[in-house]
Image: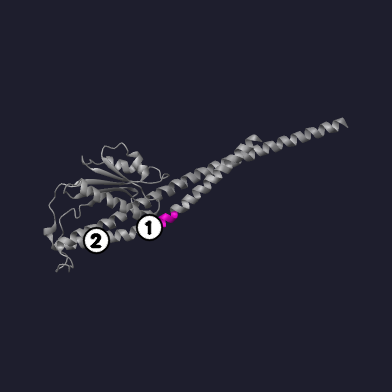
Amino acid sequence: MPRQRDIRRRIATLGEINGILAAMKNLAMLELQKLGRFIGMQRQAAQTIEEATADFLSFHRSLLLPSRQVFEVYLLVGSERGFCGDFNETVMSALRSITPAADASLMVVGGRLSGKLSGAAQAQIHVEGAGVAEEVERVLTDVVDHLDRLQREHAQGYPLGLTAFYHDPETEAVNIRRLLPMPDQPAPTPQFSFPPLLNLAPAQLLPELIDQYLYAVLHEVLYSALFAENQRRLKHMEGAMRRLEDDLGRLKVKFNQLRQEDIIEEIEVILLSAKAVAAEH
């Protein structure tokens, strides 16, 4: 009986854990549905701004700055929560795969990744990551505020060079994407016969285009990373739930075996008692 009670308690505990995992799985699936819609819209917005900028610069080549030194910032997007496998380790591996600039700054999004990069040589800025889609706006605001501060305090007149390291949900690998400066190459040959009609002077319009592009592309990066994180979490939980169900199945078989043994022992005791009573009479 004591062994049965222990096994019954373990079965109850595993059942509760399985229920918690099922709830977390459902939340991850809901987040994937929301983020899937957001990613497509932001990707389209960033692409549209890129095309508009290329068209604009094809008629205003004088605004293209010659290649010069930039103040490098690496944006590393990890997870704020756990239970997503090697999500953060692969971001760290992608950073190690390049030769970082000596004076580059690391902007680390996500508490789990921040803890793993605490010993890195580069100066670090830590930003609390998003747990759900609604928190992405807050993360983006924090990232932009830090970029503005770095531009004022450390860039010393040089433009910012921003490279993002984040998980791409389509390739299921870490994407290393150059975001700034924009554009990173000479403007293409004009595709239209006439320049675009502008309400601002060209020199005023270009910074506005870059700001709008950065706003859209950072949304895409953060939404993509959160989507990939929930993908990993969903797979991780499905694997954990399968293992839990296997363990529950084995425990239930063991419990039934012990129960059957106890019933057989009880029957044997009853039979022996009946024989003893019959012998006395």
**Secondary structure beneath disc 2?**
helix
Along the viewing direction, whichever of 156 and 244 lies nearer the viewer? 156
The residue depicted at 85 percent of the width and 30 percent of the height is 279
Quarter holding the C terminus? Answer: top right
Residue corresponding to mark 2: 49
Q: Residues within 10 Å of mark 1 (few under 14, many from 20)?
A: some
Foreground pick, 41 / 152? 152
Quarter of the image where the N terminus is located: top right
Q: Which mark is residue 17?
A: none
Q: Which residues are magenta?
A: 29-37
Q: Which residue is mark 1?
A: 36
User: Quick one: 241 or 179, which is closer to the camera?
Assistant: 179
Q: In the rendered view, would you say 93 is above or below 40?
A: above
Residue sitting at 47 percent across and 50 percent down? 24
Q: Earlier in the sequence, mark 2 or mark 1?
A: 1
Dot 1: what SS? helix
Q: Tell me what residue is drawn at x 63 percent, y 35 percent.
A: 3
Instruction: Decide if residue 223 is in sight here.
Output: no
| Dot 1 amino acid type | Gly
Viewer-proximal residue among 198 and 128:
128
Q: Amino acid at mark 2?
A: Ile
Cα separation, mark 2 vs mark 1, equals 21 Å
Decide if residue 37 is on the left or right side of residue 197. Answer: right
Q: Residue 174 in the image: x percent, y percent?
A: 31, 47
Residue 27 in the figure: left or right of residue 203: right
Residue 45 locus on image (x, y percent): 28, 61
